[in-house]
Image (cartoon, helix red, strand yellow):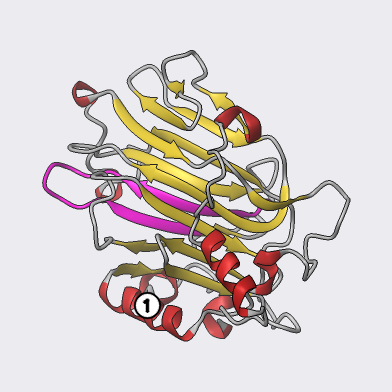
């Protein structure tokens, strides 16, 4: 991403961007996060540097950051349930508070499937309470086979969603704010959860959770937070914050992004001709 750092500083930033700790001890869950639901000692199992979220007939589970943030590189390592997972949704997202009505939200959602069929990764963005901005992908790997990196870079220039080091979605904060164009600017919390999405997640709700296959377990790692707390202190748009120096994708990232959209994207709301009853968001025209 375009920036003006000296070579040694750029190397450090890229290491941070890649999620490397440079020998620092891993941050434990309780330092920056708290359980939100399923905190019964079973559905949310806290192992310090890893948390397992478990869903069965009785409950799912979820957790939240303790603080709100105004910019940052939000990074979680995730492994989703394997096998038959129809109706099961594993989510990692940012959201304003409260999480309904006139709110902003940025979602990674894994939509479970039946045996032998790939799990879809759906991204969605809510702005001022308006969603319907879904993009879906079948990834180039099995997200249930191993832990992978999922990141959201959010600063005053752009919102970039990455899988490992590959950008899969970009929303630019266009100068002058084009008519009808929106970009998230309110403080948000980090959230993660596993829950029953039987009504819509798999084949538009035609295939539901099979509770005989429960429990379903997702693993989450990496609980350090590279972000600006929205506490009224230093402005979260400060150029002194390293993640705010990335104002564009690099040429290599642009090529990778183009490749993902052409080979792995299976649905894009901007191209959906059946959305005639819905107002096409401004970013479909300008972004």
Quadrant where the image shows the C terminus: bottom right
Residue 56 in percent (x, y) is at 33, 22
Q: Residue placed at 47% from the left, 36% from the top?
A: 193
Asked whether the viewer can see residue 131, the reply is no
Is residue 104 located in the magenta-colored stretch of the structure? yes
**Where is 189 relative to 74, above or below?**
above
Residue drawn at 43 percent across, 38 percent down: 220
Horizontal placement of 222 versus 203: left or right? Answer: right
Q: Residue 35 is drawn in which quadrant?
A: top right
**Residue 12's image quarter?**
bottom right
Disc 1: CA contacts within 10 A as few (<14), some (14-19) or many (>=20)? some
The image shows residue 105, relative to residue 140, as above or below, that is: above
Left or right: where 246 falls relative to 257: right
Question: Going by the image, does 283 lie left or right of 256?
Answer: right
Query: What residue would you read off at disc 1?
Result: 256
Which stretch did the figure color magenta?
Answer: 103-124
Q: Quadrant of the N terminus?
A: bottom right
**SS at badge 1:** helix
Report if residue 61 lies within the magenta region: no
Q: Residue at x 73, y 64 (%)?
A: 241
């Amino acid at each position: 991403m375009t920036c003006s750092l000296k070579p040694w500083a750029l190397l450090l930033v890229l290491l941070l961007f890649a999620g490397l700790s440079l020998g620092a001890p891993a941050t434990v869950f309780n330092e920056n996060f708290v359980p939100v639901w399923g905190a019964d000692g079973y559905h949310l199992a806290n192992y310090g540097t890893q948390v397992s979220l478990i869903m069965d007939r009785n409950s799912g589970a979820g957790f939240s950051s303790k603080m709100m943030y105004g910019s940052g590189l939000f990074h979680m390592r995730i492994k989703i349930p394997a096998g038959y997972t129809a109706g099961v949704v594993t989510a990692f997202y940012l959201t304003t508070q409260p999480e309904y009505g006139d709110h902003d939200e940025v979602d990674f959602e894994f939509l479970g499937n039946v045996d032998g069929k790939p799990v879809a990764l759906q991204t969605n963005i809510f702005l001022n309470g308006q969603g319907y901005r879904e993009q879906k992908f079948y990834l180039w790997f099995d997200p249930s086979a191993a832990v992978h990196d999922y990141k959201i870079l959010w600063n005053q220039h752009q919102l970039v969603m990455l899988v490992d080091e590959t950008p899969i979605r970009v929303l630019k904060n266009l100068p002058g704010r084009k008519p009808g164009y929106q970009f998230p600017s309110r403080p948000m919390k980090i959230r993660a959860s596993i829950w029953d999405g039987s009504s819509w997640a798999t084949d538009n709700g035609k295939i539901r959770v099979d509770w005989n296959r429960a429990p379903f377990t997702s693993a989450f790692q990496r609980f350090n937070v590279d972000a600006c707390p929205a506490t009224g202190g230093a402005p979260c748009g400060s150029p002194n914050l390293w993640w705010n120096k990335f104002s564009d994708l690099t040429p290599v990232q642009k090529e990778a992004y183009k490749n993902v959209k052409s080979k792995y994207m299976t649905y894009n709301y901007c191209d959906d001709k059946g959305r005639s009853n819905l107002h096409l968001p401004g970013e479909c025209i300008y972004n």
